Amino acid sequence: MSNYSLSGFSGLTPVVKNLLILNVALFAIDVALRMTSGFDLTHLLGLHYITAAEFKPIQLLSYMFLHAGINHIFFNMFALWMFGTILEQFWGAKRFFIFYMVCGIGAALVQMLVAYFRIQSLSAGLPPEQSAEILQKLCSDGGHILMQGKNYADATLGQLNLIIHTPTIGASGAVFGLLMAFGMLFPNAYLYIFFAIPMKAKYFVILYGALELFLGMRNSASDNVAHFAHLGGMIFAFILIMWWRKNEKSRYEI
């Protein structure tokens, strides 16, 4: 096992460095395309609901390398650098990369699952004999309507259209997986909230997870943060670490 530092400021490790480069490069390309041609890369690579006309399987992977603005990418990359450097030093490059990707894809799957339940709930308000046809039309045509800056006047159809066609982007799901891993591996290490208030990592993870659950369940119309994707990254992180621990323990049992 390689040496590691709990400070998180011991320099860039290889996987973290390449992830930072990829995220920043795609952010710059996305900004340049919007400014020069008006093309929004998130329509192509952002994660759409599985029945949306825009959905492609690669989006389960590509969505985590796009960001909505400077603040979005800065805080995600800062967390990737701070926690990712420590975890890559602790695990090694291969295991860290697998972990990061599993958390990111897991976050996407949870986001899809939550969207499915929300769609089912909203669909209950549609005429039963027409619901399948309405949903099919939403999936095929709704994205074009949103790209024109419009939406359906009917509240239920409008909400369904937004769920199906609004893309999810960002590394937050994978980053929340890193946070969970840090809390599990270094539970008594101190994190400084707002760079001033010390809190042990295990308590910070619990409180942050509870906050994300509360905000996700509240489902505020003005909140465009994918809280359940964050929770999905944490859930998959927990499962993967526990699975690794179980398998590694069994190797030494006689």
Image (cartoon, grey):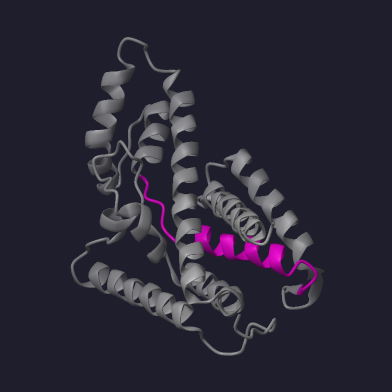
Name the residue rendered at 28%, 73% in the picture.
29
User: Toward the viewer: 101 or 94?
Assistant: 94
User: Toward the viewer: 213 or 181?
Assistant: 181
Name the residue rendered at 46%, 69% in the picture.
97
Picture quadrant of residue 216: top right
- Does residue 171 appear in the picture of this structure? no
Image-based side of 203 in relation to 243, left or right: right
Q: Which residues are magenta?
A: 166-190
Residue 164 position (above or below residue 135): below
Q: Quadrant of the C terminus?
A: bottom right
Picture quadrant of residue 170: bottom left
Name the residue rendered at 43%, 68% in the picture.
69
Instruction: Please say whether residue 189 is one of the residues in the magenta stretch.
Output: yes
Name the residue rendered at 36%, 57% in the picture.
61
Residue 157 position (above or below residue 96): above
Q: Outermost residue toward the top?
A: 129
**Number of marks in the rendered image:** 0
Q: Outermost residue toward the left?
A: 37
Horizontal and vertical percent position of residue 193: 74, 71
- Does residue 164 appear in the picture of this structure? yes
Instruction: Please say whether residue 57 is one of the residues in the magenta stretch.
Output: no
Residue 212 position (above or below residue 1): above
Horizontal and vertical percent position of residue 239: 60, 51
Image-based side of 153 in relation to 195, left or right: left
Horizontal and vertical percent position of residue 1: 61, 80
Horizontal and vertical percent position of residue 31: 31, 71
Q: Outermost residue toward the front?
A: 254
Picture quadrant of residue 133: top left
